[in-house]
C-alpha cells in the first residue's frame, strides 16, 4: 500500500502528533475506542492538524470579512504578475473547482477586494485583479497570521520544520498518485 510504504517517511512526526492526540483525548473523554489502524491514525492526525490550522486561521480572516478560501484567492492574486490572473489559473493553484471559484470571486468583487473583468482577447475568460482594499486586508492580517503560525510551530526547530515539510511533500506526492 502507498500509505504503508510512506509511513516511515513521517515516523518522526508521529510522536508529536500522538502526544497531541493523547492530550486532546484526555480533554474530550468519551466512551469511543478507535478501531483505526496505525497508518489510518497517522493520516487522521495529519488531517486533524490541518483542520485545526484552518479553524484557527479562519477566525483571523473572518475579522476582515474573509473566508479561508477567499483569503487564499487574495494571496494568489497578490503573488501573481501585476496582481492579476485568470480565474482558471487561480482555481488550479488552489485546487478549487471552477464553479466554487466563480462564487468566491463574485463575493470578493462585491465586497471590493478584487475586480472581475472579461479578458478582451477571449470573452470566455474571466480575469481577477486584487484591489487596494484586498492588498490592505492582506497587510492587516499578516502579523496576526504569522504570530499564530509561530505559536503552532514553536515546538519545532528550523531543522525539524524543514524535515517535516520534506516529509509532507513526499506524502502529498504519494497521495496525489492515488
Image (cartoon, rainbow, N blue to C red):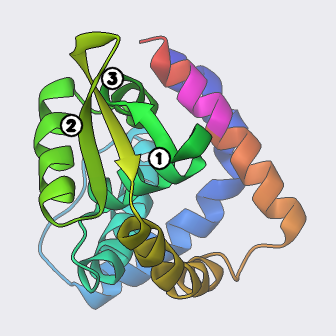
Cβ atoms at labels 2 and 1 below 8 Å apart: no
Q: Secondary structure at mark 2?
A: helix
- Quarter of the figure with residue 131: bottom left
Q: In the drawing, does residue 98 fall left or right of residue 156?
A: left
Instruction: Sort mark 3 into few (<14), some (14-19) or many (20+) by Cα contacts within 10 Å.
Output: some
Residue drawn at the location 71% of the way across and 48% of the way down = 165
Q: Is residue 134 left or right of residue 115?
A: right
Classified by dominant secondary structure, the portion drawn in magenta counts as helix
Q: Is 17 positioned to the left or the right of 134 in the image?
A: right
- Name the residue tied to disc 2: 101
Residue at the (70%, 40%) spot, across then down: 167
Marks 2/3 in contact by CB < 8 Å: the verdict is yes
Look at the image and tell me whether residue 44 can be seen. no
Residue 156: where, in percent of width, then height?
75, 73
Element at label 3: helix
Which image quadrant is residue 143 in? bottom right
Percent x, y of residue 72: 40, 54
The disc placed on residue 88 is 3
Q: Earlier in the sequence, mark 2 or mark 1?
A: 1
In the displayed image of the protein, which residue is found farthest to the right? 159
- Magenta segment: 169-173
Name the residue that disc number 1 marks: 77
Q: Residue at x 20, y 84 (%)?
A: 29
Amino acid at each position: 500500500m502507498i500509505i504503508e510504504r510512506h509511513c516511515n517517511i513521517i515516523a518522526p512526526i508521529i510522536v508529536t502528533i500522538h502526544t497531541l492526540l493523547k492530550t486532546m483525548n484526555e480533554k474530550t473523554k468519551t466512551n469511543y475506542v478507535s478501531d483505526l489502524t496505525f497508518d489510518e491514525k497517522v493520516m487522521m492526525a495529519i488531517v486533524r492538524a490541518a483542520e485545526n490550522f484552518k479553524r484557527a486561521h479562519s477566525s483571523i480572516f473572518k475579522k476582515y470579512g474573509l473566508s479561508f478560501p477567499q483569503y487564499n484567492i487574495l494571496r494568489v492574486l497578490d503573488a501573481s504578475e501585476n496582481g492579476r490572473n485568470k480565474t482558471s489559473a487561480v482555481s488550479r493553484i488552489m485546487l478549487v473547482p471552477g464553479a466554487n471559484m466563480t462564487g468566491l470571486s463574485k463575493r470578493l468583487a462585491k465586497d471590493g477586494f478584487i475586480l472581475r473583468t472579461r479578458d478582451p482577447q477571449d470573452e470566455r475568460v474571466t480575469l481577477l485583479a486584487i484591489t487596494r482594499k484586498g492588498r490592505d486586508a492582506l497587510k492587516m492580517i499578516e502579523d496576526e497570521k504569522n504570530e499564530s503560525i509561530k505559536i503552532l510551530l514553536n515546538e519545532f526547530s528550523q531543522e525539524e520544520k524543514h524535515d517535516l515539510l520534506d516529509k509532507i511533500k513526499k506524502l502529498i506526492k504519494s497521495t496525489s498518485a492515488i
